[in-house]
Amino acid sequence: MDYMDYKKFIEENIIEIDCSHRGGIVKVDVSSLFPNIDNAVAGASQNYLGGGMLAKVEGGRNFKLEDLTPEELSVYLEFSEEVKRFLHEQTRHAGDEYEDMDYETNQGMPSKYKGL
């Protein structure tokens, strides 16, 4: 597949976005990437851990990876990484010890608060 500007694709195909300094969610219509999947939606979410800390960004989708061709799977994996980075940039705020964390460091955080 040729180079794809995933950031532009995400911005042009957002179904829902709700994010703040406490995490959020972005859902993207990916039907044009996966024409054999009806109403394909994929995106990312990020929980708030408390104390100013954001959880790692996690990807999600409404279809099974097994339903993708090998080429589509490759596209999905690239897209999934880019949509997680996109959400991270939306929830990242400069000047805060935790919220200004770069993407790679943030991905080392837990996905949710596990409790005591």
Image (cartoon, rainbow, N blue to C red):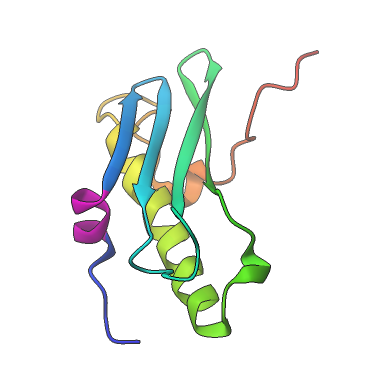
Q: Classify 5 as above or below 40.
A: below
Q: Quadrant of the C terminus?
A: top right
The answer to whether 100 appears left or right of 44 in the picture is left
State which quadrant residue 31 falls in.
Answer: bottom left
Residue occupying the point 44% across, 74% down: 75
Quadrant the N terminus occupies:
bottom left
In terms of depth relative to the viewer, which is nearer, 50 or 97?
50
In the displayed structure image, the side of residue 21 where residue 49 appears, left or right? right
Seen from the viewer's position, the closer of residues 49 and 82 is 82
Residue 58 within the segment the image draws in magenta: no
**Image x and y of residue 27, in percent:** 39, 42
The residue that appears at 33% across and 26% down in the rendered structure is: 18
Residue at 19% across, 59% down: 8
- Quick one: 37 or 49, which is closer to the camera? 37
Residue 14 drawn at (x, y percent) = 27, 44
Could you say which quadrant of the image residue 66 lies in? bottom right
Where are the magenta residues, as a range? 7-13
81 over 14 or under it: above or below: below
- Residue 92 spot, x, y in % from top left: 32, 33
Residue 45 position (above or below residue 67): above
The number of numbered discs placed on residues in the rendered structure image is 0
Q: Is residue 47 left or right of residue 96?
A: right
Picture layout, residue 85 above or below residue 2: above
Residue 26 appears in which quarter of the rendering?
top left
Relative side of 63 to 25, left or right: right
Q: Position of residue 96 (x, y in %)?
A: 33, 24
Residue occupying the far bottom of the picture:
1
The secondary structure that dominates the magenta segment is helix
